[in-house]
Image (cartoon, helix red, strand yellow):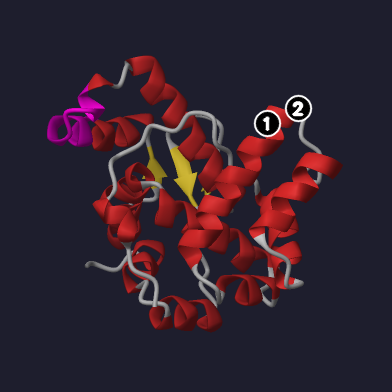
C-alpha cells in the first residue's frame, strides 16, 4: 500500500514542471520491460529519449518522472499500461497528487469541494484562496511572490486541462467531472489511496 507521504512534505511552488504525459508513457513502457531508472537515465543522456530541447531539460524531465513514479510504487506501471487513455491521464494526475503537497491541498480543499457541491465553475481566485491559506500556515510559503503564484496557478490549470478535467480559457473555467472506471477505484482503494479517490469523486472526507 502507498502512504500519503506527500502530506508530511513541505509545500512547494513548482513553476517549471509540466504534466509530461507523453514522456510518462515512454518512461512507463521502459520500466514495464524490466529496465531500471538507471537505464532510463542512460537512455535520456545518450539517446535524448524524451526528445528534449536541451540536455538540462532532458535531465529535469527524467528526474521529475522518476520522483513521481517512485512515489507510486511497483504496481503502478502494470496498471497504467493496461488502462484506457482517459484513465492513464487520471493516473498521471494521481502522480502529481502524490508528489506535490501544494497541488494536493488545492485539489482537496477546492476541487473536491466543488465536485461535492456541484459548483463546477473554477475561478482564478479559487487558486489564490488556497495559496494564501498555505502562506498563512507555512513560513517558507509566506515568501512566495505574486509572480510565483501566478505561474503555479497557470501550471495547475494546465495539469487539469491535460488530465481532461478543465475547459475554458478564461476565468471562470468549467470543471469536467472525472469518470473513474471501477478498475481505477479498486486500484486506488487497494493501494491505500482512498483519499485521492475522494478528491476525484468529490466525496467528503
Q: Give the number of the disc on residue 41.
A: none
Q: Position of residue 96 (x, y in %)?
A: 47, 51
Residue 6 colored magenta? no
Category of crowding for the residue at label 2, using alpha-carbon neighbours closer than 10 angstroms: few (below 14), some (14–19), many (at least 20): few
Of residues 180 and 120, the one drawn nearer to the viewer in this rendering: 180
Of residues 109 and 38, the one drawn nearer to the viewer in this rendering: 38
For mark 2, give the secondary structure: loop
Q: Which residues are magenta?
A: 132-142
Q: Give the number of the disc on residue 57.
A: 1
Q: CA distance from mark 1 to mark 2?
A: 5 Å
Q: Position of residue 50 (x, y in %)?
A: 77, 44
Mark 1 vs 2: CB contact within 8 A: yes
Category of crowding for the residue at label 1, using alpha-carbon neighbours closer than 10 angstroms: few (below 14), some (14–19), many (at least 20): few
Q: Residue at x 75, y 63 (%)?
A: 30
Residue 100 visible to the viewer: yes
Q: Position of residue 106 (x, y in %)?
A: 32, 45
Q: Which residue is mark 2?
A: 54
Residue 171 visible to the viewer: no
Q: Residue at x 56, y 71 (%)?
A: 76
Amino acid at each position: 500500500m502507498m502512504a500519503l507521504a506527500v502530506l508530511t512534505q513541505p509545500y512547494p511552488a513548482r513553476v517549471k514542471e509540466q504534466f509530461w504525459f507523453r514522456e510518462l508513457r515512454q518512461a512507463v513502457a521502459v520500466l514495464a520491460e524490466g529496465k531500471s531508472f538507471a537505464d532510463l537515465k542512460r537512455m535520456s543522456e545518450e539517446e535524448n529519449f524524451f526528445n528534449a530541447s536541451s540536455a538540462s531539460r532532458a535531465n529535469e524531465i527524467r528526474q521529475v518522472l522518476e520522483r513521481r513514479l517512485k512515489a507510486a510504487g511497483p504496481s503502478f506501471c502494470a496498471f497504467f499500461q493496461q488502462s484506457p487513455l482517459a484513465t492513464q491521464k487520471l493516473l498521471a494526475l494521481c502522480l502529481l497528487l502524490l508528489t506535490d503537497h501544494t497541488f494536493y491541498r488545492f485539489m482537496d480543499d477546492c476541487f473536491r469541494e466543488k465536485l461535492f457541491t456541484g459548483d463546477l465553475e473554477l475561478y482564478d481566485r479559487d487558486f489564490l484562496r488556497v495559496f494564501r491559506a498555505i502562506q498563512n500556515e507555512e513560513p517558507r510559503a509566506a515568501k512566495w511572490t505574486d509572480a510565483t503564484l501566478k505561474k503555479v496557478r497557470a501550471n495547475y490549470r494546465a495539469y487539469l486541462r491535460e488530465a481532461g478535467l478543465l475547459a475554458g480559457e478564461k476565468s471562470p473555467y468549467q470543471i469536467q467531472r472525472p469518470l473513474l472506471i471501477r478498475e481505477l477505484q479498486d486500484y486506488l482503494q487497494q493501494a491505500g489511496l482512498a483519499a485521492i479517490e475522494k478528491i476525484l469523486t468529490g466525496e467528503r472526507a
